[in-house]
Image (cartoon, rainbow, N blue to C red):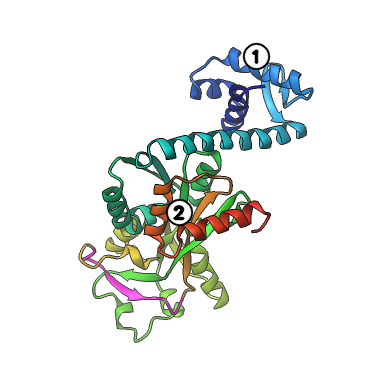
Amino acid sequence: MNLHQLRYLNEIVRQGLNISNAAEALFTSQPGISKQIKQLEDELGVEIFVRNGKRIVAITEPGKEVLSIAQRILHDAKNLKHVGQEFRAQDTGVLTIATTHTQARYALPPIIKKFMKLYPEVQLSLHQGSPTQIADQVLSGDADLCIATESLSLYDDLVTLPCYEWNHCVVVPPRHPLLKEKQLTLEALARYPIITYDFAFTGRGRINEAFQKADITPKIALTAIDADVIKTYVELGMGVGILAQMSFIEKRDRHLRMIEAAHLFKPSTTRIAIHKNEYLRAYAYDFIELFAPHLTRQVVNDAMRHSADGGS
């Protein structure tokens, strides 16, 4: 048994059980991968995959156990490399952050600017995606940490840490009738087509919850994953927008007007998530603390230890 075999196993599963795609991703040959997986099965004495001819069609129950252990071993191997890098070159390396558009566009820029000033030799990489996609990137080792509002706490292998709370706001074109309301209500909002986030993004669950609790069915005219897209269609007069208040910037959004809506929708919490077995470089701790000052190295380590001991 060797690490190459475990990497092949992991990549086959990542590629949807497609050996050809796995071979391409790992810059090796399909027959070579097939041979190594067969050798691993022979050594372990179990079949990892269900096959139909030469095609892999499923992973067996013992295969799932083997995969879980293999992924832990691969993660620990990566951590060993990080330990060496930490003591050999403390201020150089790569930090990969997976996040959503709203965080990348509105919350992270000042943090990244400060971080790059502190660590000019660290290569910073931003991966954008849905909350599910970015969580999967951390779980697979493609990202060191992820930042989002939704879903992160649903993953058992992620340690999630609350960063800050934020509220939604409503955006409308100038001279829109809603601007005359003394205090905005859900009933008033529901008179107009609404443009807001796709269900998996940026506190959409809070919006749905508020309307459901009031027994109001809003007309959702358009959904998007991107606040800038929402604002564009509001400018075109296609409806009123509900978005994260941080994404409205008065100087830039001169063709729109913002209405406070914190009284209508419960606040949402943005979180950072880390693999529970991750070895963090010193600069990763510093990035986390820049983003959320209360998340000191001690706080992060305590949460990691609590997770490793079986806590939630």
Residue 252 magenta-highlighted: no
Residue 231 as seen in the image, left or right of residue 47: left
Instruction: Say which residue label 1 marks.
Output: 35
- Tell me what residue is drawn at x 62 percent, y 57 percent: 306
Asked if one can make out residue 61 in the rendered structure from this viewpoint, the answer is yes
Instruction: Say which residue label 2 marks.
Output: 147
| Of the pair 159 and 76, the residue shown nearer to us | 76
Q: Amino acid at mark 2?
A: Ile
Q: Element type at marker 1? A: helix
- Tell me what residue is drawn at x 33 percent, y 62 percent: 247
| Of the pair 141 and 76, the residue shown nearer to us | 76
Q: Element type at marker 2? A: strand
Which residue appears farthest toward the front when viewing the image? 87
| Dominant SS in magenta | loop
Residue 157 as seen in the image, left or right of residue 292: right
Residue range corresponding to the magenta coloring: 253-264
